[in-house]
Image (cartoon, rainbow, N blue to C red):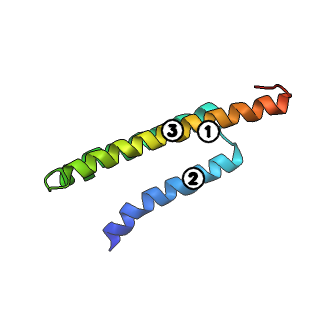
Amino acid sequence: MLRILGFVAFPVLAGVLGGAMAAWRPPGARLASAVQHFAAGVVFAAVAGEILPGMSHGAHLPAVVIGFIVGVVVMLALGAWERRAEEAAQREARGAFP
């Protein structure tokens, strides 16, 4: 039980300290973007290193590959949509027409 608490304590402390630091001094756009990209890389590494090898031994490999590809495409499409929406909002705020 103590070992489990030790594993849980580090991410909890990191989250609390990171939240306190961000509340005290909010990060700039570049740092926030870098942290988000790092987090996305960690998620992809976890999926590639932990989940995909276990799934590839089963009969569901095509479904896993298709699901992974669809997930990446949706993520990239949402990013492109968000950038266009933000640019349109900025143009509208300046009073410019498309």
Q: For the residue marked with disc 3, what is the amino acid?
A: Ala
Q: Nearer the viewer, mark 1 or mark 2?
A: 1
Q: Which mark is residue 82?
A: 1
Name the secondary structure under disc 2. Answer: helix
Q: Which residue is mark 2?
A: 17
What's the CA distance linking mark 2 and mark 3?
A: 33 Å
Q: For the residue marked with disc 2, what is the amino acid?
A: Leu
Q: Which residue is mark 3?
A: 77
- Is residue 11 or residue 61 the one in the foreground? 61
Give yes or no for contact between labels 1 and 2 (Cβ–Cβ under 8 Å). Answer: no
Q: What residue is shown at x 46% (from left), y 43% (from top)?
A: 74
10 to 49, vertically: above or below: below
Q: What residue is shown at x 75% (from left), y 35% (from top)?
A: 89
User: Residue 27: image x %, image y %?
Assistant: 65, 39
User: Residue 98: image x %, image y %?
Assistant: 75, 25
58 to 81, vertically: above or below: below
Q: What residue is shown at x 60% (from left), y 31% (from top)?
A: 30
Q: Quadrant of residue 85?
A: top right
Residue 35 appears left or right of 51: right
Name the secondary structure under disc 3. Answer: helix
Question: Tag count in the figure?
Answer: 3
- Is residue 57 or residue 25 the one in the foreground? 57
